[in-house]
Image (cartoon, coloured by chain):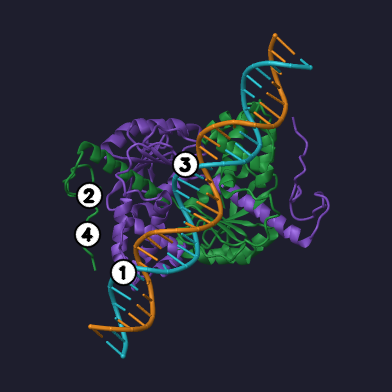
Chain colours: A purple, B green, C cyan, D orange
Amino acid sequence: MATGRNHRPATRSRGIPEATVARLPLYLRALTALSERSVPTVSSEELASAAGVNSAKLRKDFSYLGSYGTRGVGYDVEYLVYQISRELGLTQDWPVVIVGIGNLGAALANYGGFASRGFRVAALIDADPALSGRQVAGIEVRHVDELESIIDTNGVSIGVITTPGGAAQQVCDRLVAAGITSILNFAPTVLSVPDGVDVRKVDLSIELQILAFHEQRKAAEALAQDVPEPLAAEAAPSGPGRDQGPDGDIPAVMPA
Amino acid sequence: MATGRNHRPATRSRGIPEATVARLPLYLRALTALSERSVPTVSSEELASAAGVNSAKLRKDFSYLGSYGTRGVGYDVEYLVYQISRELGLTQDWPVVIVGIGNLGAALANYGGFASRGFRVAALIDADPALSGRQVAGIEVRHVDELESIIDTNGVSIGVITTPGGAAQQVCDRLVAAGITSILNFAPTVLSVPDGVDVRKVDLSIELQILAFHEQRKAAEALAQDVPEPLAAEAAPSGPGRDQGPDGDIPAVMPA
DNA sequence: CAATCTTTGTGCACGCGTTCACAAAGGCAT
DNA sequence: ATGCCTTTGTGAACGCGTGCACAAAGATTG
């Protein structure tokens, strides 16, 4: 994503693979749970199982951070928690703004997982004047006119967009202009941002569609197992809600 | 994810790469927008730009679906909408259940993006008896005791988990036992499911942590640009909220 | 009908991520 | 101190995904 930043070789050797970075929060969560149970050390096998990954992958991931861990014993839980937190930048406080206080924005404002990891909701912002001054999750909603001053005053560098799709790019542009360099986008829109700005996208509808694809494939597979060698695609399926052949390689008619 | 299903070679040639499947919803969204503007055809270049991907990648993606598209012209918008919808299984109706009607569950219930793509919220389910019978987004909340009968009656195969982390695995087990084969998990928990069940995870906290990592890296880079060759890690940073060296390769003291 | 121009579809090479398998390293018992 | 046992850290092979670059295909124009 975002082809930018190919100049400057990232200080060299400090280059942690993106896939590894994406797994570090998983490890951190599992380690935190162990820490709360006062478990002193953990092996790569145990931790990998708790995080739902392969143990070889976990060891390789940790090898990018350095040689923490003791052969024959495992990893010191507290030490790893600290190292990963530091690597992810969670030892410092990250103020974030949430723009678009609809159902989803309000849900995020109430979400406890933010505050627990060094993230602090600095402000809730919405374009609707009727919302201004109202409290959501104990935080006052401010009008979008104040966006720039809020970001500037609080030194915010991370923004969360939960507006409708139509307003997302506009809000994004204002956030970027105000100095935001990381955006978490929940709106169903492809945001275009300048180089140096990171965007991560969370799209509920897309996730469901991917599930539907696999679900359909599974259904087709199960059907193929019942009827070992179907001759035509139109095998008159009487299952619930099927209105197409599972293996419809027939070109179908061009609608236009 | 989920190593299962390596037997049965997927009817062969029907094997669409996972990365491609994940992009199909993006194309579909862009195409739908074009369709609403009554645009008859679109080139791979235009569509790729609208979807935020490389045009070569888009063409290769479409090549897995078949040779739709006309050389020298482009793709027929309506035809592609139909083909992708069919491939994703969106031509049929997918009833889903949402378990855990807190802030997030309610937000999802209200989310319009579901219904517009063939997904129908068949039921809202919560363990809190006080919620039972209450209406959320025009849908009655049912008690978790009815989970199995609801799934069975409505033929639900997709479940969404928006419970607290502690209840997620338990809910997941019940969903699977009741016949659910696809799960969208918003709880901060690694779910363990039997083979044949697909799980997709959406974790807001993890996304923010990944952003924080890159944000920290950018800050360190900017700092390194100001001071071309720093000698020690403790360069006395006086920036907002910094409490650690940007390039802390020093082993630091073992806490235990 | 022939020439030209546009755009698709894809062979190929490259790079990243994953997994295997094993040597090195440290603890522990004798 | 020595040998054994456990577990890490990593070299190497493999597979998937991406992007380039171009030939094939069809539309379009004269």
Mark 4 neighbour density, 10 Å: few (under 14) some (14–19) many (20 or more):
few
- Frontmost of labels 4 and 3 is 4
Q: Of marks 3 and 1, which one's residue comes earlier in the chain?
A: 1
- Frontmost of labels 1 and 2 is 1
Question: Which residue type carries mark 4?
Answer: Ala
Mark 3 neighbour density, 10 Å: few (under 14) some (14–19) many (20 or more):
some
Q: Against A242, is B219 above or below?
A: above
Residue A70: assigned label: 1
Task: Estimate the spatial distance between the alpha carbons at disc 2 and disc 3, rounded to whole Å.
Answer: 39 Å
The residue marked by circle 4 belongs to what chain? Answer: B
Residue B245: assigned label: 2
Task: Estimate the spatial distance between the alpha carbons at disc 1 and disc 2, rounded to whole Å.
Answer: 25 Å
Q: Of marks 2 and 4, which one's residue comes earlier in the chain?
A: 2
Locate residue A210, reporting x and y percent: 59, 49
Q: Against A179, is B192 above or below?
A: below
- Frontmost of labels 2 and 3 is 2
Question: Which residue type carries mark 2?
Answer: Gly
Q: Nearer the viewer, residue A244 or B73?
A: B73
Locate residue A144, reporting x and y percent: 38, 33
The residue pinned by badge 3 equals: A102
Mark 1 neighbour density, 10 Å: few (under 14) some (14–19) many (20 or more):
few
